[in-house]
Amino acid sequence: MQGLHLTADLHDCQCQAHWLVDAEALGARCTAAVRHAGLQPVGQLFHRFPDTAEGPGGVTATVLLAESHLCVHTWPERRAVTLDVYVCNFGGDHSARARQLLETLVALFAPREAVRQSLQRGQVPVHAG
């Protein structure tokens, strides 16, 4: 269960608009990015939400990995995206691959601002006594 959990909140994305609304195109790009990073996709779900009064519906793209998961959520009316990459490091350290995947997707969306966070998961507590 030990692993690396990366997130990025992307604001004012300058990418082509279809990356924010086309579930199939975004899903295919996510899957290709996963493979390019050296991670193993084992399942996927890509969903486009209905249009609203504020504009076109966004997309949720989820790729299940042998190592854990990638999730992408878009808000086209705000030109915003959230990214979530988690890799378990059972059997090997996949941290560099997770970082590569995140940076590939950040580059795709070309945000003017990106807020990144990194969390080490599954640390075993040390008990005094």
Image (cartoon, helix red, strand yellow):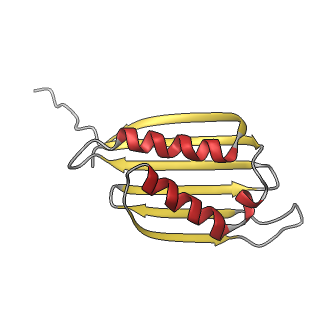
Residue under the point 62% across and 49% down = 82
Residue under the point 20% across and 49% down = 91
Q: Residue furthest right?
A: 53
Q: Residue furthest top?
A: 128
- Residue 112 coordinates in the image, percent (x, y): 74, 34
Q: Residue furthest left?
A: 129
Where on the picture, by quarter, is residue 48?
bottom right
Please give left or right for residue 74 compared with residue 39 in the image: right
Please give left or right for residue 90 compared with residue 74 in the image: left
Image vertical order of residue 25 relative to residue 5, above or below: below
- Residue 38 coordinates in the image, percent (x, y): 38, 51
Where on the picture, by quarter, is residue 127?
top left
Please give left or right for residue 3 compared with residue 108 in the image: left
- Residue 32 coordinates in the image, percent (x, y): 51, 59
Q: Quadrant of the C terminus?
A: top left
Residue under the point 47% across and 41% down = 100
- Residue 96 coordinates in the image, percent (x, y): 38, 38
Numbered marks: total: 0
Image vertical order of residue 88 relative to residue 19, above or below: above
Image vertical order of residue 125 relative to residue 91, above or below: above
Question: In this view of the protein, which residue sits in the foreground, 92 or 121?
Answer: 92
Please give left or right for residue 50 compared with residue 82 in the image: right
Residue under the point 23% across and 49% down = 90
Question: In this view of the protein, which residue sits in the foreground, 36 or 86?
Answer: 36
